[in-house]
Image (spheres, rainbow, N blue to C red):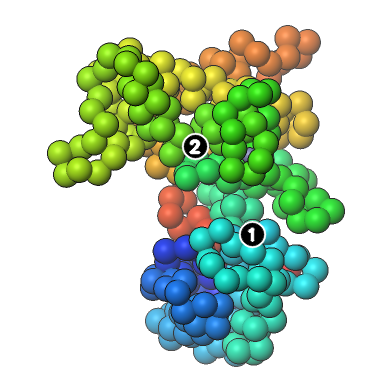
Amino acid sequence: MAHYIGLDLGGTNIKSGVVDDRGQIVAKLSRPTRPETGPDGVLASMVDAAREAADAAKIPLAQIAGVGIGCPGPLDFQKGLVKAAPNLPGWDHVPVRDHIARALGRPAVLENDANAAAFGEFWVGAGRDVQDMVMLTLGTGVGSGLVVEGKIIHGADGLGGEAGHLIVQPNGRRCGCGQRGCLEQYASASSVPRRALDAMAAGRRTILKPTRADGAEIDAQDVFAAAQQGDELALGIVEETAFYLGIGCVNLCRLLDPQMIVFAGGMIHAGEFLFDRVRRVFGEHSWTITDNHVQIVPAKLGSDAGLIGAAAVAQAK
Ligand SMILES: [Zn+2]
C-alpha cells in the first residue's frame, strides 16, 4: 500500500497528515501557521509538520510515495511557486514545492487549496462516484475547484476555476477582486451576516441583534437560525443566498455539464433548509430543452478535505 503526505497551508493553521492510497488518514496533526515568521519560518514549520506526521504514522519518509501541498494562491504551477497569498504577508514568489521536496527528499506537487479540497471530495468524498464535479466552498469568500474528466482545471495562468467570481449580478456589490456582483458577494458565509447588518442599518425590523451576548458580531449561522424561526429579514437573506447559488449552479452546468455540484463550508450545516431552496432556484432557471440531472449536495470530508485532497493530488501525479 502506498502512502502520501498531505500538507494544507492556511492563514491560521498548517495541517499535515499521512494518507494511504485508498484515501484513509493514517495520522494527522495541526499546528499554528505563525505567518509573522515569514516564508522561511512557515516553510520550516511545514517540513517539521510533514516529518511529525510520518513519525506519528510510523512510516519512514523514504517510504512516502509523494507529498501534496495545498496553498492559498495565486500559484505558478509550472515552477511550484506561491506568487502571493492574502493571509500570508511578505509572500512573493515563494518556491514552496522545491523547498519541501528538497527538505524531505520526496517528490512534491503544489496545488491551490480550494482545488485540493475539491479533489479530495472527488477522490473519496461526495464525488467519489463521478468524473465531472464542481465544488464551491462557502467560507470567507467562495473558493471553488473544477474537476473535469477526472482532472483539475487550471487554465492558462493558473486562474481557471474561480467560480466564486462568476458575475451573477451585473453592477452588483463590489468584490475585493475588483469586479462587481461576484457570486461570493452573495453566497459566502461572510456575506450573509454582512447583508443582514446592512439591512438592519437601513432600519429593517428583525429578531437579530448586531452582536451576540459575548460581543462578537453575528455570523451566517445566526442569520440561518433566525430565518428558521421565521424572521422575515433573515429569511430574505437566506432566499437571496440560495437564489444566487442556484443561478451560479445553472451557469456552471451550461459551461461544464458536471454530474455533481458540491457545497462545502460551515453554511452546509443548514442542510435541506439551504439545499432545497438552491435546487428550487436551479429548477426554475435551468434548461427546459432537456432534463437536468446534476446533483447539488453537501461535502462529506469536513475540515479534512484539504489534507486528503493534497494527498490526492500527489497520488494523481
Ligand atoms: Zn470577485
> Label 2, label 1: how many angstroms apart (C-alpha)?
18 Å
Residue to which mark 1 is pinned: 73
Residue at x 68% of width, y 16% of height: 286
Q: Nearer the viewer, residue 144 or 74?
A: 74
Relative placement, left or right, of 61 versus 313 is left
Residue type at tag 1: Gly
The location of residue 252, given as percent across then percent down, is 70, 31
Q: Which mark is residue 61?
A: none
Crowd band around label 1 with a 10 angstrom C-alpha radius: few (<14), some (14–19), many (20+): some
Residue 2 vertical placement versus 219 (above, below): below
The location of residue 103, given as percent across then percent down, is 60, 89
Residue at x 55% of width, y 83% of height: 40
Residue type at tag 2: Ser
Residue to which mark 2 is pinned: 188
Residue at x 42% of width, y 66% of height: 13
Secondary structure of residue under mark 1:
loop
Residue at x 80% of width, y 68% of height: 78
Q: Nearer the viewer, residue 301 or 14?
A: 14
Q: Quadrant of residue 12?
A: bottom left
Crowd band around label 2 with a 10 angstrom C-alpha radius: few (<14), some (14–19), many (20+): many
Secondary structure of residue under mark 2:
loop
* Number of numbered markers: 2
Which numbered disc, 2 or 1, marks the residue that appears first in the sequence? 1
